[in-house]
Image: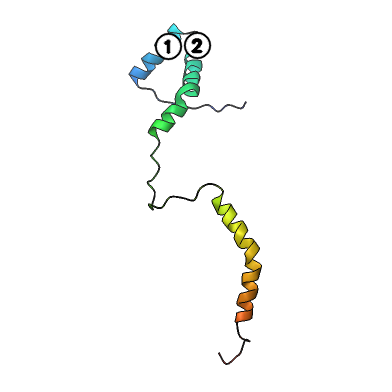
């Protein structure tokens, strides 16, 4: 896996916490930081992410699969509808 170096400025309190963690665990500071990010970054993202915008409408969305069924029904009847609409029109004229 390719890695990319990342420079991070740590305040004094966070730096001392990282030093303590490296002293008390079998991990060095870099590995401890990587492990902490892997284990907890997703949680932090979920907690800090902006909440999704509220719905614009008060109408409930169609149940899953209902829209596909509706379009399938329209597809079958569309040819009959198109033929009826074409038959209902008069002949084209330049005088319209």
Near-viewer residue (16 or 93): 93
Near-viewer residue (45 or 91): 91
Q: Quadrant of the rendered structure where residue 80 is?
A: bottom right
Q: How many marks?
A: 2
Please provide percent x and percent y for residue 26.
50, 8
Please provide percent x and percent y for residue 35.
50, 19
Residue name at image x 34 percent, y 18 percent: 12
For residue 39, side relative to residue 14 (left or right): right
Please provide percent x and percent y for residue 85.
60, 76
Instruction: Provide the residue designation for mark 2.
Output: 27
Report if the CB atoms under discs 1 and 2 are less than 8 Å apart.
yes
Q: Is residue 2 above or below residue 85?
A: above
For residue 43, side relative to residue 93 (left or right): left
Density class for disc 1 (Cα within 10 Å; few <14, some 14-19, many ≥20) is some
**Which color scheme did the rendering employ for the protein?**
rainbow
Near-viewer residue (13 or 88): 88
Q: Is residue 15 above or below residue 51?
A: above
Near-viewer residue (52 or 34): 52
Please provide percent x and percent y for residue 55.
39, 49
Residue furthest left as drawn: 13
Q: Is residue 6 above or below residue 14?
A: below
Residue name at image x 63 percent, y 72 percent: 82
For residue 9, side relative to residue 27 (left or right): left
In what element is the residue under mark 1? helix
Residue name at image x 39 percent, y 31 percent: 47
Residue 21: mark: 1
Give the Cα separation between the discs numbered 1 and 2. 8 Å
In what element is the residue under mark 2? loop
* Quadrant the N terminus occupies: top right
Q: Earlier in the sequence, mark 1 or mark 2?
A: 1
Residue name at image x 43 percent, y 7 percent: 24
Q: Quadrant of the rendered structure where residue 86 is?
A: bottom right
């Amino acid at each position: 896996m390719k890695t990319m170096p990342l420079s991070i400025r740590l305040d004094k309190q966070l730096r001392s916490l990282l030093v303590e963690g490296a002293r008390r665990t079998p991990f060095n500071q870099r590995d401890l930081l990587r492990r902490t990010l892997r284990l907890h970054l997703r949680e932090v993202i979920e907690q800090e992410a902006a909440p999704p915008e509220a719905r614009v409408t008060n109408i409930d969305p169609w149940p899953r699969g209902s829209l596909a069924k509706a379009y399938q029904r329209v597809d079958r009847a569309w040819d009959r509808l198109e033929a009826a609409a074409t038959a209902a029109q008069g002949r084209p004229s330049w005088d319209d």
